[in-house]
Image: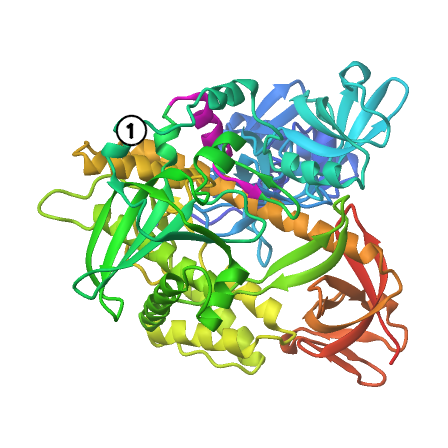
Amino acid sequence: MKRKKNNPANEKSTSFLNQILGVFVHTPNEQLNYKQIAFALGIREKTGQKQVMEGLERLRRQNSLIETQKGKFKLNPNKLEELGIRKYITGKVDMKATGKAYVISAELGEDVFIGSSNTGQALHGDIVKVLLFPKRKDRKLEGQIVEVIKRAKNQFVGIIQKSKNYAFLVADSQNMPVDIFIPIDSLKDAKDGQKAVVEITEWPRQTKNPFGKVTKVLGWPGENNVEMQAILADYGFPLGFPKQVEQEADKIPETIPADEIKLRRDFRKIPTFTIDPGDAKDFDDAISFRKLENGNSEVGVHIADVSHYVKPGSAIDEEAYNRATSVYLVDRTFPMLPEKLSNHLCSLKPNEDKLCFAVVFEMDDQAKIVNHWIGKTVICSQRRFDYDEAQKIIEEGVGDMAFEVTEVHKLAQIIRSKRFKNGAINFETREVKFRLDEDGKPIGVYVKEYKDSNKLIEEFMLLANKRVAESIGVKRGIHPPKTFVYRIHDEPTPEKLNNFVQLVKKLGYQMKTTDRKHLAGSFNHIFEQIKGKGEENLVETVAIRTMAKAIYSTQNIGHYGLAFNYYTHFTSPIRRYPDLMVHRLLWSYLNKGTSADAAEYESYCEHCSEMERKAEQSERDSVKYKQAEYLMNHIGDVFDGLISGVSKWGIYVEIAESKCEGMVRLGDMKDDFYYLDEENYQVIGQKYGTVYKLGYPAKVRVKNVDLAKKQIDFVMAEE
């Protein structure tokens, strides 16, 4: 039997039809006519345009195209898979100031590029549905946003630009690519140039800009109170408590009933103290200590019993859940709970009876736990120390409650040493603090020291969190563990870990990655080596990014950074809602309660993790703002610094005394033409060979500060 020869004419025809389809594939939601197709294919003559018309008709008959109206065609979405196109994925939008975006998709394992003309009505952080375009050789995966599934937020903070008959809000966020149109009757007395909070009310399909209304006028830019409130509002945190919540808090009795005290272990006569920052207002943890007759030590970790006062379903509880966390800005705290609870009823102030939930440890001289008890207590703290006061007692061995403080410190040192031997990683983040004048303006910047008094408290809080998690999570008998809220931290991916190893290798540091303990030891050794060096900030930042983000979950996988198989957050229910959930679940299970619904609590965990991220971002923004504000009064001043980063745009320098970071733009370096040697983290002068390398000292002059963008520009100071 003769084989049928291929018909060149048919092959040519098929190729032409595929070219037409290719135009539709790259604009899958557009309706196109034959002229638009011909133009896209570079066809100008009449004969060619006629062939395009015929091709469109053939594709319509094949059902590859749909004729939406006479002469206009659109790709048939049901044919996408036949054309080798994966239809849709969902992901989170990472919007850029230019209007282009990337959609971060867990199901794909890679980001999808979205051109500015294909973002639709999506905004930064939204969860969206994306139509994927066919993968082109050596090009990043591209797509088009076709649906906004969930808005990240619908309120924005910015500057009002007012005209006669309408206004716009120009958002502070660099990730907001469009202005919000505001009808003149929705301005709420906002004046031109003022900062305001605007809520998006609608976004008509045919308009470029969303419509909105002013919900709160904040005031004039640059005023301290305005800027701090703007940061909170931009991340969706409320600026005050609803009236119902305040009224509910006011009704809570301030005296503790005698019947309640009888239900608890009484620690009021046992030496008890708190150690907190000097400016703290809420004290949610206390330590009790006494020597037992058998020679062992009893250390009690007593945590404010917020669950006694805040009941599920109450207005206070609903508001606390929505906030999920207190937020600590440079000059103020936005609490999760109303002041009556956070600063009074639940705060473990000295010489006041307070209700607590406690983990009490019996330990030998080597800090080995001989026994422990978990339950409700009543305490009366005898002394409130700040960290400096406690540190002085640790160093000198004298002062109020010196015996108790020094004995607990000795145990904490042993516990800490064991923890690092077991593979814990010592992430000591630097906390930048400000000295402020009466108007909240920064007059000084310093880095808070992390001393033994801090470590004392940290070790016993970690130990209590670990023991509580073990009490529920460890399987006993044939029944699975009950639903619980864990604080989990996954191990780093091999790719991220390898990138970090290569980074520090180029900087002259070695990592051992043969096993978990060697890796943790390498991290800790590097953190010691980089202290005070120019690369300290970069290495610490990349190390943290190398690690997975710690989150809340009902699915326990342990905590990699702490090297704990079981870990939770039990010790701060005044300022963290997950701790309040842990208290409720723990008390229920201690009283033989049934297991909670896992799916329900997992959704609570996801919400709390997201709000925690927003709180951290707002806190960082407030620090950056104050650093920029501080240097506004130092324009033209010269500072010693260290090169903390390099890029094709410029050299990042961190001022040694204040940790303020700014950029020396390469365009401002007039003595030579400088280029980036990315592989070796340095910038080199082409003519004279001058090298500016990561970690090198640099003397800089403050050139300019953009307070709105929180950006600082330096120039190299003349030697």
Q: Residue at x 27, y 42 (%)?
A: 266
Q: Secondary structure at mark 1?
A: helix
Q: Is residue 454 above or below residue 689?
A: above
Q: Nearer the viewer, residue 714 or 120?
A: 714
Q: Nearer the viewer, residue 101 or 154?
A: 154
223 vs 557, left or right, is: right
- Residue kind at label 1, given as amino acid type: Ala
Q: Main secondary structure of the magenta part?
A: helix
Q: Quadrant of the C terminus?
A: bottom right
- Quadrant housing residue 717: bottom right
Q: Nearer the viewer, residue 537 or 404?
A: 404
Span colored in magenta: 313-327
Residue 172 visible? The answer is no
Q: Is residue 270 above or below residue 505?
A: above
- Quadrant housing residue 438: top right
Residue 547 x %, y % = 46, 60
Q: Residue at x 85, y 75 (%)?
A: 673
Residue 265 x %, y % = 24, 41
Total number of numbered discs in the rendering: 1
Does the stretch in magenta take in 320?
yes
Residue 131 x %, y % = 54, 37
Residue 187 visible? The answer is yes
Q: Residue at x 41, y 23 (%)?
A: 253
477 vs 36, left or right, is: left
Q: Which residue is mark 1?
A: 258
6 vs 487, left or right, is: right
Q: Is residue 336 above or below residue 714?
A: above
Does the stretch in magenta take in 264?
no
- Quadrant housing residue 561: bottom left
